[in-house]
Amino acid sequence: MRDTSGTNISDKRTVSRLSRLSTVIAVCASALLSVVGPTQAAPAKDPLPADIPDYQAALDAVKSTDVRNAVCRFLRTPVPTDSAGGPVQTIPETAEPCQGLPLFTIKDPVALNEITPGFVAGTTPPLPTEAIKLTQLVSSLSTTVNGRNATVMLAPTQGGGWHLAAVRDGDSDAAHASKATLGTFVFTEPQIRGWYQLKLTTVEPLNDQAREGLGGQASVSLSDYQKLVKARYADKLPGSEYDTKGYSSGYSLERPDDDAPSSTLLLAGGSGTALALAGGAALLHRRRRATSR
């Protein structure tokens, strides 16, 4: 059937229906984009501790000449073989500390997360945001230098940024910390040098010390892990009777005492030039006690 203009009426109805359908599709697509679009264009920032603040400052620090020279001075100095009670060995200043050493670069820093005192005390709930905290950044070297590797440790600077805290012999800290993946976090229980991976609310061991800390279990819930560390350390927190009577330095977020030479540190002062090489763990122990006091 045709209208007076000669156009087929059924064709006109088809065009009209298609036009209305196109309008509906366009409106639905617009509504869908308004919901999905912002999420895809600007994903929510991860609020967990692995989100490193002022990361560009950290990158600038590990790439700086001062930090590289500090690492070179560390690598040029033989690891002390004295017992834990041995004297602190001063690292001499040199005009060109990297001269004659093989070429190396310092890798991009990664987060070093540790369990928090509140989590240990049981005063905070067993949630990832409460259980672990970013305390330092660690970087290892791109290659061994004269058979040695080293870990650069950065500490947060008051007011923002990062600065050299120490250079540690070996690269185990950085190697473990680098195992964090998208959606998982790696943290340490420094008192036993245990390293763990946190997947949602499941804790899995990454080294022998951590497996021993979990009693040989392949994994535990974050809630059960909190019970374990509370039983181990809650009565040894700073201010506890165990601490005030001098039995130990109390619970601390600092590194534990290790056996030499793995505890060998290049200690950096505020100027970045006051450097000393600790022979064994004695210096670390003194620093921890001074800190707790």
Image (cartoon, rainbow, N blue to C red):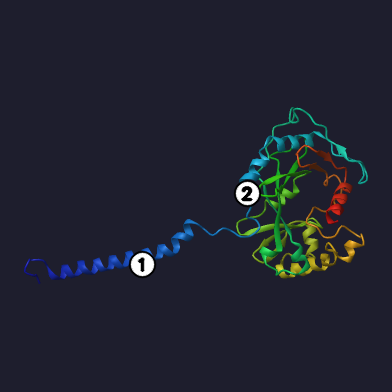
Q: What element carries label 1?
A: helix
Indicate whether 275 appears above or below 115. Answer: above
Q: Where is residue 119 in the image (x, y as percent from the top left)?
A: 74, 66
Q: Where is residue 283 in the image (x, y as percent from the top left)?
A: 87, 47
In the picture, residue 240 is in which quadrant? bottom right
Instruction: Write the residue at 12% across / 68% down.
Output: 8
Furthest-left residue in view? 4
Q: Could you tell me the amino acid type at mark 1? A: Cys
Say the numbered circle drawn on residue 285.
none
Q: Nearer the viewer, residue 157 or 103?
A: 157
Q: Is mark 2 on a helix, strand or loop?
A: loop
Q: Quadrant of the C terminus?
A: bottom right
The alpha-carbon separation of the residues under discs 2 and 1 comes to 41 Å
Q: Where is residue 78 in the image (x, y as percent from the top left)?
A: 84, 36
Task: Using a 10 Å C-alpha cutoff, classify the residue at mark 2 as few (fewer than 14 neighbours), some (14 to 19) or many (20 or more).
Answer: few
Q: Where is residue 94 in the image (x, y as percent from the top left)?
A: 78, 29
The total of numbered circles placed on residues is: 2
Question: Which circle's residue, 2 or 1, is located before the other in the chain?
Answer: 1
Please give the residue where the numbered disc 2 appears in the rendered image: 54
Q: Nearer the viewer, residue 178 or 108?
A: 108
Q: Is residue 249 left or right of residue 42?
A: right
Furthest-front residue in view? 159
Please give the residue where the numbered disc 1 appears in the rendered image: 28
Furthest-bottom residue in view? 1
